[in-house]
């Protein structure tokens, strides 16, 4: 396994997987909810923060 910087072409999938995993975690504790736990704007805020760095783990 290797950590690499999140590539621009992977951002759409990254956001989708982050939202799905946060939603699953929330709903497994509190039950189903129509509210989206992690809105895309919150992910964008983190990704665009110059003090933050995003990585993905790849299998080599």
Image (cartoon, rainbow, N blue to C red):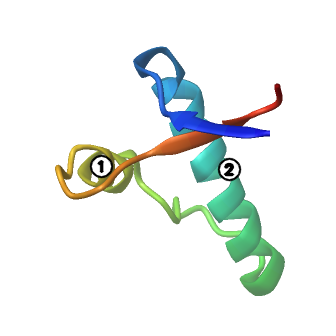
What percent of the width, then of the height, locates residue 58?
73, 32
Q: Which residue is mark 2?
A: 20
Residue drawn 30% across the image and 55% down it: 52
Residue drawn 41% across the image and 20% down it: 8
Left/right placement of residue 57 relative to residue 40 reads right
What numbered label is drawn on residue 26? none
What percent of the width, then of the height, locates residue 53?
36, 49
Q: Which residue is mark 1?
A: 41
Please, what secondary structure does the residue beneath circle 1 have? helix
Tag count in the figure? 2
**Quadrant hosting residue 51:** bottom left
Compared with 26, 14 (above or below) is above
| Mark pair 1, 2: CA separation | 15 Å
What percent of the width, then of the height, locates residue 10?
53, 22
Left/right placement of residue 16 relative to residue 54 reads right
Residue drawn 65% across the image and 69% down it: 33
**Quadrant hosting residue 14:** top right
Q: Nearer the viewer, residue 52 or 42?
A: 52
Q: Nearer the viewer, residue 39 or 8?
A: 8
Label 2 crowd bin: few (<14), some (14–19), many (20+), radius 10 Å: some
């Amino acid at each position: 396994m290797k950590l690499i910087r999140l590539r621009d072409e992977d951002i759409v999938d990254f956001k989708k997987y982050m939202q799905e995993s946060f939603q699953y975690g929330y709903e497994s504790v509190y039950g189903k909810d129509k509210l989206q736990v992690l809105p895309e704007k919150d992910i964008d805020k983190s990704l665009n923060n110059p003090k933050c760095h995003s990585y993905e783990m790849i299998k080599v």
